[in-house]
Image (spheres, grey):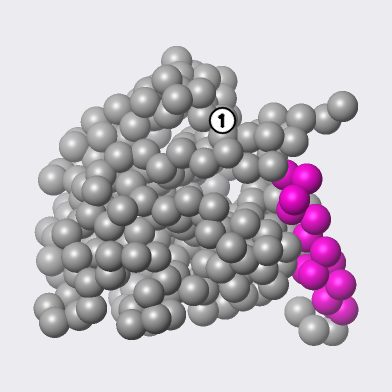
Amino acid sequence: MARTTFRIALANLPFPSSPDDAVERAVAAVHEAGREQADLVAFPECYIPGYRISSHAVPLPTTEYLERAWNTVADAARAANAGVVLGTERIVDGAMRISVLVINRDGTRAGFQDKVQLDPSEDALYTPGTSRQVFTIDGLTFGIAICHEGWRYPETVRFAARQGAHLVFLPHFGEAEAGAFQPTSFADPANTFHEKAIQCRAAENTCFVAAVNCAGEGSPTTSAVARPDGSVLAWKPYGIAGLLIADIDTSEATRLLASRLRPAQL
């Protein structure tokens, strides 16, 4: 009988202090995921070298730095026997893209998912990707919707579900803003819509959704996993660094509601 239970880890890590620190923290998290017997570990948006925002001065990466970083994380994946969903930047035809590198358990690269729908604030820094795909590791099929894509464009998650994804990862970055509400419980009604959107994307497509953010004091969102019925399977306390471990049963991810959507509605 086909395997249906998988363990995922969400790396709810502090914002890296430097590009090299990002690699060191990512490698440590991959090894920890291996010790926890996780099949996959996922990282926040652009964790390598760090998300570009005015509050964090992140130097522009070189191709050499990125290749070295990806190879180092791939070596860790192979040693830990854990797949990796790595939030990163990459350079395509001389232009920067927000991306996710998927690494197999043996350290080989499964491919990239670029951010296709940029947030308006990112237009001056990045070029958008042009296509979407799903990945499969050990029978677990998953898609990736990066931050703004998953929050505001439900079709990004629906695409993956209709392509057979049991799970959609939503790597993102969000940090506390002055005077903003600081939640202590998941999907608090006083908070923004973002955490409720995780539950909606799961329920409207009958698949799992796993959102992963950095750990920061007063963070507006935390790392969490929603079940295919929209209920919350697990969430990490706000601002607490570490892995969020969750076991998912892919037999629950029927993708029924996503599959019933007529092509003209896409």
Count of numbered tags = 1
Residue 218, position as x, y percentages in the image: 19, 65
Residue 246 is left or right of residue 68, and the answer is right
Residue 61, position as x, y percentages in the image: 26, 48
Q: In which quarter of the image is residue 260?
A: bottom right
Residue at the (80%, 84%) spot, across then down? 265
| Residue 231 visible in this rendered orientation of the protein | yes
* Numbered disc 1: secondary structure: loop
Residue at the (42%, 20%) spot, across then down? 35
| Residue 46 visible in this rendered orientation of the protein | no
Residue at the (26%, 34%) spot, across then down? 25
Residue 211, position as x, y percentages in the image: 47, 57
Residue that carries the numbered disc 1 in the rendered image: 39
- The local crowd at label 1, few if under 14, some if 14 to 19, many if 20 or more residues have their Cα within 10 Å, is many
Residue at the (30%, 27%) spot, across then down? 28
Q: In which quarter of the image is residue 5?
A: top right
Question: Disc 1 residue type?
Answer: Asp
Quarter of the picture holding the C terminus:
bottom right
Chain part drawn in magenta: 250-263
Asked if the stretch drawn in magenta spans residue 259, the answer is yes
Identify which residue, 106 or 247, lies in the foreground.
Answer: 247
Q: Residue 27, relative to residue 246: is it above or below?
A: above
Q: Residue 82, relative to residue 234: is it above or below?
A: above
